[in-house]
Image: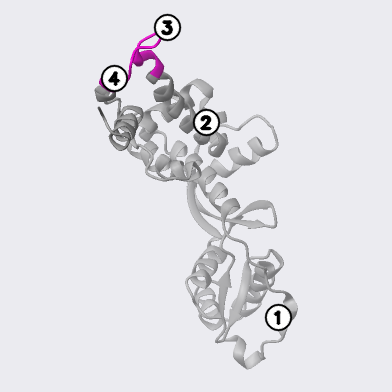
Amino acid sequence: MIGLEDLQRQFQQFVLGGDVAILLSIEDGPRSGPGPRLAIYHEAYRIRLRSALADTFGTLRAHLGAAAFDEACARYVEAAPSTVRNIRWFGAGFADFLRSTQPYDRRSWLTELATFDWTLAAAFDASDAPGITVDDLTSVRAEALAATVFTFHPSVRLLNLSTNAPLLRMAADRDEPLPAARALDAPTGWLVWRRDFDTNYRSLDEVEAAALEAACGGATFAQICAQAAERLGAEQAPSRAAWWLRQWIDDGLIVRLEV
């Protein structure tokens, strides 16, 4: 007689990969054999995974349509069996799957739609931390500000996108018809973050994107200004950097100052 642990292992192998060894360990029922009864669990597992993907990748689903999206999800489920206990994280590799799998790999916006949807979901689920205030900034001595570095909210994400994926997401959020997906003439930087219970995103010009990336990487305020001066000139850079810093604080992006 098979032990419980081995029976559980066989059941898992059947659900995940269709291994039929467990059929020998299950008795016939009054109405059907073990095969049809076990098939319920096999399919229910996949339905649940596809449902979780639909919850996360809503914009991609709206663009592809329910049938095509479900087919992509089914292929992903078989190609990348779940290895995490929390189903929330199952879609982590979905964008990479689309990037490397035919016919999705021929439409770059599908990968970026998945990336953008996933990034917003990850920002929403990130840890919380109280943002600093302008008063916290003004308490830093002027001579010390140059050496100040900034810690950003755990939800902050930076993206560089080559398609209009965020515009499709914006239309989906507003229950409006989605515009046609297309590639852009040049990549655009995007900032994603959560404030309270709201996930936000906005585009970044090239100079602010570089400044924010540097700040997130531990650059001091003086280094941020120096980098901006290379693009804007020495006269404009300090005022522009000060404006960015005020905007980042007002948006709740910065949670700590350290000299």
What is the three-letter code of the residue carrying label 2? Ser
Q: Are marks 2 and 4 in contact (CB under 8 Å)?
A: no
Residue toward you, 206 or 175: 175
**Which residue is identified by label 4?**
23
**Which residue is identified by label 1?**
136
64 sits left or right of 171 in the view: left
| Label whose residue precedes the other's in the sequence (1 or 4) | 4
Is the residue 187 above or below the residue 208 in the image? above
Image spot of residue 130 (x, y percent): 67, 68
Quadrant, the C terminus: bottom right
SS assignment at label 4: helix
Image spot of residue 162 (x, y percent): 47, 47
Mark pair 1, 2: CA separation: 44 Å
Mark pair 2, 4: CA separation: 28 Å
SS assignment at label 3: loop
Please tell me which residue is depicted at 47% across the width and 38% down the height of the picture.
Answer: 109
Span highlighted in magenta in the image: 24-37
Mark pair 1, 4: CA separation: 66 Å
Q: Nearer the viewer, mark 2 or mark 4?
A: 4
Mark pair 3, 4: CA separation: 16 Å
